[in-house]
Structure formats: structure tokens, C-alpha cells
Image (cartoon, helix red, strand yellow):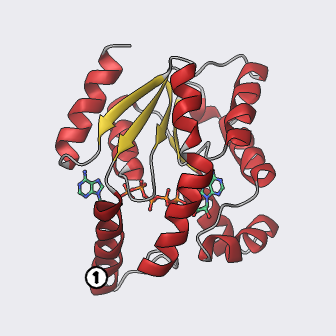
């Protein structure tokens, strides 16, 4: 199975992706995680991405498309994968289509998690507070100021993907305001109906 999890920052994409990994034994391809790993490792990509990510803006399409294309070629993706946080612009959406076609692969569905803006910022602040309380590192972009920019970027560049996939008949929407468990159940229902 190959699917995209779409939704604003804090919508629950990562949380649900991890559950899908366990259920379907396919990897979660999170561009956010991959970029953060590159920043930590101090690679050339990481150096270019760091300031952009810290400011809550989007990393360039070229960098992200190349990372994902290479990752899809790895053997654990042969049975499928969950794209989490990618594509995030119309250019990336076109690129993923070309990329998959060139590899002889097809997307099964796009699931959008719909969550109110107010709930999103609350989740992000809570995550930062919990990480700090547990003595874990806090994401540099998990604070109210940078979150505002992340949300602006989402509405400007990512929200148009809803219409893009709706027009292709691929979009399924799920109520991301429900509990984590209830969201998982709704996603399961969507996937069972494919
Ligand atoms: P990325 O790491 O992708 O972050 P994001 O999309 O902003 O989203 P999050 O990871 O914060 O949220 P999520 O939707 O995964 O929610 P989660 O499950 O964690 O991107 C970071 C940065 O990297 C970008 O700003 C950009 O700079 C760069 N980047 C990444 N991809 C890129 C791309 N394709 N192109 C260009 N740049 C890119 O949940 C959040 C919290 O809410 C958790 O604490 C969770 O426990 C809680 N929660 C989850 N579900 C629920 C629920 N149903 N009810 C209550 N709480 C819930």
C-alpha cells in the first residue's frame, strides 16, 4: 500500500503513520524526520535546511524531492510506504507523480486529517512542554511564534493539495479532532474500503 497523509502541522500525521507502520509493516517516510536527521548529522542538506526549518518555512522542493526519491528506492519500500509530510507543495505533488510513474508505482490514496487551527497550536505547545518536562530535546519549531509561520506556509503552499487530490478522485478526509484511537479507526475504515 502506498499512501499520503496530508494535514497541517500538528494534525497527527506522525502519530497515525506510526500506527500504520505497525499494522501494515510498511515504512513511514517522514520528510521532517529525514531533514532533522540530516541537520543532526551535519550533512550538506542538513546545513542548507536548518535555518529554513527553524524559521518554520519550507525547505526547497529540489532537496526534498531528491531525498524522497532515494528513500523509495530502498528495499523496505518494496511492499509500500506512508508519505508523512510530503508532498507539501504543488511542485512536490507533480514530482511525486512523475517519480512514482518512473518507478512503475502507483499511489493508493491520500488521507487528509482535518483539525482546527486552535487545537493545532495547543498540541504543539503541549508536545514542547512534555518533551521539556521529560528532559528530552524540544523541536526548535515547536513554539507559538514559529508555529504561526508553519501554519502560514501550510495555508499558502500545502492546503492547495486538497483540491489537487480531490480533483484526481484520490482524497479521503478524516476528522482529526477526534481522539487518537478514533482517528486510527476512521483511517482503518478508509483503507478497508479501497
Ligand atoms: P514535519 O516534521 O513534517 O512537521 P509538521 O508537518 O509541521 O508536523 P508535525 O510533525 O509537528 O505534526 P504531525 O501532523 O505529524 O502531528 P503529530 O502526530 O506529531 O516538518 C517540519 C519542518 O521540516 C517543516 O516546517 C519544513 O521546514 C520541513 N519539511 C518537512 N517536510 C517538508 C517538505 N515536504 N517540503 C519542504 N519542507 C519540509 O502530533 C502532534 C502532537 O499532537 C503530538 O504531541 C501528538 O501526541 C498529538 N496528537 C496527535 N493526534 C492527536 C489527536 N487526535 N488528539 C490529540 N492530540 C493528538
How many numbered marks are there?
Answer: 1
> Which residue is at the far top?
194
Q: Quadrant of the C terminus?
A: top left
Left or right: where 164 falls relative to 104 = left
At horizontal 28% and vertical 61% (from top left) the residue drawn is 119
In the depicted structure, whether residue 86 falls above or below residue 46: above
Q: Nearer the viewer, residue 65 or 103?
A: 65
x%, y% of residue 83?
54, 39
Residue 143 is at least partly visible in this image: no
Spot occupied by residue 172 in the image (x, y as percentages of width and height): 40, 26
Quickly name the residue at label 1: 134
CA neighbours of label 1 inside 10 A, class few (<14), some (14 to 19), many (20+):
few
Q: Position of residue 77 (x, y in %)?
A: 59, 32
From the viewer's perspective, is 66 left or right of 140?
Answer: right
**Quick one: SS at disc 1?**
loop
Residue 127 position in % (x across, y down): 32, 72
Residue found 41% across the figure and 51% down from its top? 14
Q: Quadrant of residue 50?
A: bottom right
Q: Residue at x 32, y 42 (%)?
A: 19
Q: Which corner quadrant of the figure contains ligand 1?
A: bottom left
Above or below, 59 relative to 67: below
Quarter-of-image position of residue 131:
bottom left
Q: Is residue 103 rendered to the left or right of residue 121?
A: right
Q: Decide: is 75 above or below 40.
A: above
Camera sees residue 17 = yes
Above-or-below relation of 124 to 17: below
Cβ of disc 1 within 8 Å of ligand 1? no
Residue at 75% in and 22% down = 103
Name the residue nearer the viewer: 127 or 42: 127
Amino acid at each position: 500500500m502506498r499512501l499520503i497523509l496530508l494535514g497541517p502541522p500538528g494534525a497527527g500525521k506522525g502519530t497515525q503513520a506510526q500506527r500504520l507502520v505497525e499494522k501494515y509493516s510498511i515504512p513511514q517516510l517522514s520528510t521532517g524526520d529525514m531533514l532533522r536527521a540530516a541537520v543532526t548529522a551535519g550533512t550538506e542538506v542538513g546545513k542548507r535546511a536548518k535555518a529554513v526549518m527553524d524559521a518554520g518555512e519550507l525547505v526547497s522542493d529540489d532537496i526534498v524531492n531528491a531525498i524522497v526519491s532515494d528513500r523509495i528506492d530502498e528495499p523496505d519500500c518494496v511492499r509500500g510506504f506512508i508519505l508523512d509530510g510530503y508532498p507539501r507543495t504543488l511542485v512536490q505533488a507533480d514530482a511525486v507523480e512523475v517519480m512514482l510513474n518512473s518507478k512503475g508505482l502507483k499511489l493508493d490514496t491520500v488521507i487528509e486529517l482535518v483539525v482546527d487551527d486552535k487545537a493545532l497550536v495547543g498540541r504543539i505547545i503541549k508536545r514542547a512542554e512534555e518533551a521539556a518536562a521529560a528532559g528530552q530535546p524540544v523541536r526548535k519549531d515547536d513554539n507559538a511564534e514559529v508555529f504561526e509561520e508553519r501554519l502560514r506556509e501550510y495555508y499558502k503552499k500545502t492546503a492547495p493539495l486538497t483540491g489537487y487530490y480531490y480533483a484526481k478522485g484520490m482524497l479521503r478526509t478524516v476528522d482529526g479532532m477526534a481522539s487518537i484511537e478514533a482517528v486510527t479507526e476512521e483511517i482503518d475504515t478508509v483503507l478497508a474500503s479501497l
